[in-house]
Amino acid sequence: MTEVSLRSLVKRYGKTEALKGISLNVRHGEFVSLLGPSGCGKSTTLKCIAGFEETSDGQILFDDRDISRKLPEDRDIGMVFQSYALFPHMTVAQNLAFGLEMRRLQKREITERVGRAMEMVQLTPYAERYPKALSGGQQQRVALARALVIEPKILLLDEPLANLDAKLRDEMRGFIRDLQKRVGITTIYVTHDQGEAMTMSDRVVVMFDGEIAQAAAPEDVYDKPASERVARFVGNANILELPVRTNDEAGVELGLPGGLSLTIQRPVPAANGTLGVMARPEQIALTDPAAGHLRGRISKRYFSGGHVEYHVETDLGPLVVLAPTSQSAKEGESVGLDFDASRLWPLPGRTGSAESRA
Amino acid sequence: MRRFRASLLILPAAALIFLFIVLPYVTVLVMSFRAPGANGEPYGPGFGLQGYAQFFDEGYYLWSLPQSLLLGIVTTFVCLVLAYPIALHIAGARRRWRGLLYGIVLSPLLIGIVIRSYGWTILLGNSGVINSTLRDLGLIQRPLPLMYNDFGVVLALSHVFLPFMVLPLLSALQSMDPAVKQAARSLGARPFTIFRRVTFPVSMPGVQTGCILVFVLAISSYVTPALVGGMRVKTTTLLVVDALIDQFQWPFGSAMALILAVSAGVIVLIFARLTAMKWN
């Protein structure tokens, strides 16, 4: 088991900085996702760790040993690619054996380990098939087994589920997660899909513009985003900019239209003027038009099975509300909105700002 | 009905192929079984196997066949060895250079075959550029035999047919997922191992196509062996033309042409069988 440390990693392409000083510690056996929009530097970070990109500055350590100048073939990594990158001219068994042959293991040991790896990903009946004769999910499992059979120090996954259809993707999430736990390997996973990152990871690292915006447990990234941008990228976010009435150690009282107020019972330093707060759609409840913190009119209604998503026009702008199907309202109906004040999250960076809503 | 009408679209092409490929072949086939002509006639009345018999009886003709096939095989091999690094280089080149490199690769095809072959005689001849330069430098006393032999013919043929090898190789290499090589590296393979165990085998469809193209073109070439070989390298194609036009023996010439075509076909089939890819 290996610990990975990135220390002020910088990657420049000519004059543009793709990575602007990334620092991150990944613990033994931890599953960390790098999450962000395309061009945020998540793939570049992974390529630097794998060695396919040379770092311009900073260090990459595997268990306190700097490997940033080592060639990829000497880093002892297992990597799974978005395109799977299987060797098309080799059977499943030959694909798995390749890395072991490079390590000059005995034939008997290779056969044994390949056999075990195929069992692990439930591909034993397909040993003699060529990749072309396998489905996407099966190819994905071959790629995973090929990366793990060499018992690498760390496992790197580059958007491995992007080419699968939705149902298979959900299945593979659980499969990869279980396998990773069973093997106990330190894993870094790159994705632009926030759902994927949240369900699979011990920790999510949100990246924008070559920098880490937040690195925290999935729950914390969702409930306590470090910035408005993180809030909006990870799930659906309603962001309200409300005037601060009072602010002391006990909490912040925020003004609402119609003389109502909301109190966040948590001290927010330097909150004067206005404060931006985030409410997730499921943290707002529909109530009687007369009750609740805010009044509004339903402009759109989307049924999605377990929940209904409402788009509500309010004096504070359009808000999105996710309600259970048991609580039904029609388009055009007037409703009241009730906030769960204990889960409202103040957004640093929006504090006291006078700029208009994004 | 729709499908039937759509298939009518291939009629013009089918007619062309029938008129100008199938029919002539049938004519050649029939002609090869005709009796030899006498008194300046190209062929005589009735049918016979004399055309084939003459080829197998006379060593002069018979030996031209292995000679031609060997020439084709060597040219193919030379092209493969020369073309592979070129294709690798172009596949890895930046996009804006690629067009220029493509142009350079295709350039031998832009020059007429006679002029190109004549160009080689200027370079390779006994008093040609290479020999006279070497003599002036005092490196040789007598001219090196660069022309009028197999060496010169293979050299000139490889020059023309190189693009037919480079292009299929290039397309095979370019259609290869670059992540496959990275995967091999991540598994611990070094550059030469990656070439031997991944890049080359994955490019086999291109190797196969290129080799078949060059081989077929090389054994059926006429002008280059005629000019650069100076009639001293006896290929079967040269003898076919000689029989048809100079000796005016159509059955014999046709028989020889068919024997060459069938032999080439057999070699191509054996090659395809040997290099068959189960995975593709």
Image: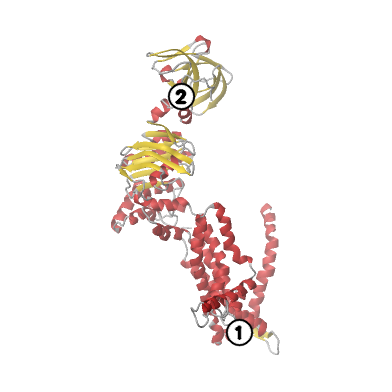
Q: Position of residue B79 (x, y in %)?
A: 52, 68
Q: Which residue is denoted by mark 1 in the rendering? A: B49
Q: Is residue B83 left or right of residue B44?
A: left
Q: What chain is tagged by disc 1? A: B
Q: How many marks?
A: 2
Q: Residue at x 68, y 55 (%)?
A: B6
Q: Nearer the viewer, residue A56 or B38?
A: A56
Q: Residue at x 47, y 65 (%)?
A: B275
Task: Check if mark 2 and mark 1 are on a common chain.
Answer: no
Up/down of B107 relative to A18, above or below: below
Tell me the crowding category of disc 2: few under 14, some 14 to 19, or many 20 or more residues within 10 angstroms, Cα based.
few
Q: Residue at x 64, y 73 (%)?
A: B114
Quarter of the image where one finds residue A59: top left
Q: Which residue is denoted by mark 2 in the rendering? A: A349
Q: Is residue B251 left or right of residue A179?
A: right
Secondary element type, mark 2: loop
